[in-house]
Image (cartoon, rainbow, N blue to C red):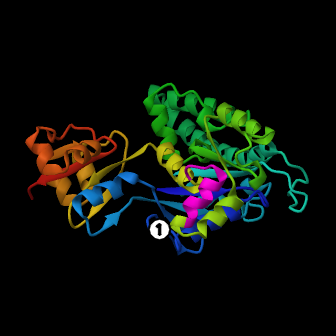
C-alpha cells in the first residue's frame, strides 16, 4: 500500500519524510529503507511478532510494510498544469491514501508561502487543486455517459444523473469523500474513475517541540474541525522531534520518549493510523523458521488470505487452522492449544480476523 505525503512549502513535509527514510538506518526492529529517491518503506509496528517469535524461537521476524511517497511540486494552478502540477497529480493518483502535512506552529525564522500561518487555508489550497482535477475527470465521464445514453437505456440515464450530481457537488468545492452515495453501483463507478478527492486522508498537524505535551493549540483544533467536515482524520505530530528520534538507538529512543512523556513515537502512530485508514488487518504465521505478518483488507476470506503467501495456497485451499495470537501465548504454543480444542478448523467462507495465527492446509 502506498501513502502519498503532501504539503505546501515550509510546513514540515520534508522534515517528516526525511525522518521516515532516516529511521531505517537506526531502528533494527522496524527498518525503513529508501528504494527510490522519493519512496520510503516502513514496517508496521506489531508487538505480537516479537512475542510469538520468542515463543517459537523463530530465526527470522518479518513485519508487514507500508510505502510513503514524497510528493512535491504543488502550486496554485497545478490542476491546470502549472509548476509541476501534472506530475504532482499523477503521483497522487497512484497512492492509496494521502498524508497531508499542515503547519500548526509559529516560527518567525521559517517563512510561509502565504506569509501567514493558517492551516485550514493550506488545506483548502491543496484540496482546491484536487477538486478542480476531479471536476475535469467527472466532466469527461459525464460527456461519455450522455453519449452512451442517447439510445434511451434507463440504467445509462441514471448514470448520467449520478455524474451530474457529483459534478455539482465538486463545483460547490466539496470532495468526493463527502458525497452521499445512493448505491453500490455509484460507489463502483467512482472507484473505477480514480478520483483524487475520493482517497482517504490523514491531516498530519505538525506542531513545534514546545507544544509537545502542552495540549492542542488553536491551529490543531481548527484542523480537527476541518477534518470532521470532510470525513478525514487528524494526527498530531512534531516532525522535528521525529527527526531527532529517528537518529537514536532503540534504548536511546525509549529514554527520549520517556523524557517527553510520550508512549509511542509519532511515526509509529502515523503508520498504525494509515494501516487503519486503509481498512487493513494482519494475520500471522509463526514457526521456528519465521514469524511473519501478512497484510490483507478487512473482510478477506481465508482462501484469498492464503493466496497472499502463494497462489498455490489459494488454488488448492482445503482449510485454515486458526488460533488467536493471545491464546497461543497463554497456552504456550500450537500443540497445547490444539490439545485443548482452541485451534479452529475454518473453511472457504471464513473471514480472517486481525491477529489470527494461521496454518493453511492445501493440495495442488
Please tell me whether residue 232 belongs to the stretch shown in magenta.
no
Please tell me whether residue 261 belongs to the stretch shown in magenta.
yes
Q: Residue at x 67, y 49 (%)?
A: 133
Q: Residue at x 56, y 43 (%)?
A: 200
Residue 129 image offset from top left, x and y in percent? 73, 49
**Taking the image as drawn, is residue 317 in sight?**
no
Along the line of sight, the residue nearer the viewer: 137 or 285: 285
User: Is disc 1 placed on a helix, strand or loop?
Assistant: loop
Residue 65 image offset from top left, x and y in percent? 43, 60
Residue 87 image offset from top left, x and y in percent? 66, 64
Residue 243 image offset from top left, x and y in percent? 66, 65
Q: Is 162 left or right of 80, judged from the image as shown?
A: left
Q: Main secondary structure of the magenta part?
A: helix
Label count reads: 1
What is the quadrant of the C terminus in the image? bottom left
51 w.r.t. 84: above or below: above
Along the line of sight, the residue nearer the viewer: 252 or 227: 252
274 w.r.t. 37: above or below: above
Along the line of sight, the residue nearer the viewer: 150 or 26: 26
Q: Residues within 10 Å of mark 1 (few under 14, many from 20)?
A: many
- Check disc 1 and report the residue beneath it: 31
Which stretch did the figure color magenta? 252-264
**Taking the image as drawn, is residue 128 in sight?**
yes
Q: Residue at x 60, y 66 (%)?
A: 246
Amino acid at each position: 500500500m502506498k501513502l502519498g505525503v503532501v504539503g505546501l512549502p515550509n510546513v514540515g513535509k520534508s522534515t517528516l519524510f526525511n525522518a521516515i527514510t532516516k529511521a531505517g538506518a537506526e531502528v533494527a526492529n522496524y527498518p525503513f529503507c529508501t528504494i527510490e529517491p522519493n519512496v520510503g518503506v516502513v514496517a508496521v509496528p506489531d508487538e505480537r511478532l516479537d512475542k510469538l517469535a520468542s515463543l517459537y524461537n523463530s530465526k527470522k521476524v518479518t513485519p508487514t510494510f507500508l510505502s510513503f511517497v514524497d510528493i512535491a511540486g504543488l502550486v496554485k494552478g497545478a490542476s491546470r498544469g502549472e509548476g509541476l502540477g501534472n506530475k504532482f497529480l499523477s503521483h497522487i493518483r497512484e497512492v492509496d491514501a494521502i498524508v497531508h502535512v499542515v503547519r500548526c506552529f509559529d516560527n518567525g525564522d521559517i517563512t510561509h508561502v502565504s506569509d501567514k500561518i493558517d492551516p485550514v487555508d493550506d488545506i483548502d489550497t491543496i484540496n482546491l487543486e484536487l477538486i478542480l482535477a476531479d471536476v475535469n475527470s467527472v466532466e469527461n465521464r459525464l460527456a461519455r455517459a450522455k453519449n452512451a445514453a442517447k439510445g434511451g437505456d434507463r440504467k445509462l440515464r441514471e448514470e448520467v444523473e449520478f455524474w451530474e450530481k457529483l459534478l455539482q457537488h465538486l463545483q460547490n468545492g466539496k470532495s468526493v469523500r463527502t458525497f452521499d452515495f445512493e448505491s453500490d453501483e455509484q460507489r463502483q463507478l467512482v472507484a473505477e474513475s480514480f478520483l483524487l478527492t475520493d482517497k482517504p486522508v490523514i491531516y498530519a498537524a505538525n506542531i513545534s517541540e514546545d507544544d509537545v505535551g502542552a495540549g492542542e493549540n488553536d491551529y490543531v483544533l481548527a484542523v480537527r474541525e476541518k477534518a470532521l467536515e470532510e470525513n478525514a482524520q487528524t494526527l498530531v505530530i512534531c516532525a522535528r522531534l521525529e527527526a531527532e528520534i529517528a537518529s537514536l538507538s532503540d534504548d536511546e529512543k525509549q529514554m527520549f520518549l520517556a523524557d517527553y512523556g510520550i508512549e509511542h513515537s509519532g511515526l509509529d502512530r502515523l503508520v498504525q493510523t494509515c494501516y487503519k485508514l486503509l481498512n487493513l488487518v494482519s494475520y500471522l504465521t509463526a514457526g521456528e523458521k519465521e514469524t511473519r505478518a501478512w497484510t490483507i483488507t478487512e473482510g478477506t476470506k481465508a482462501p484469498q488470505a492464503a493466496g497472499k503467501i502463494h497462489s498455490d495456497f489459494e488454488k488448492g485451499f482445503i482449510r485454515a487452522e486458526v488460533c488467536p495470537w493471545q491464546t497461543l501465548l497463554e497456552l504456550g504454543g500450537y500443540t497445547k492449544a490444539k490439545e485443548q480444542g482452541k485451534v479452529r478448523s475454518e473453511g472457504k467462507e471464513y473471514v480472517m480476523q486481525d491477529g489470527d495465527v494461521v496454518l493453511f492446509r492445501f493440495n495442488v
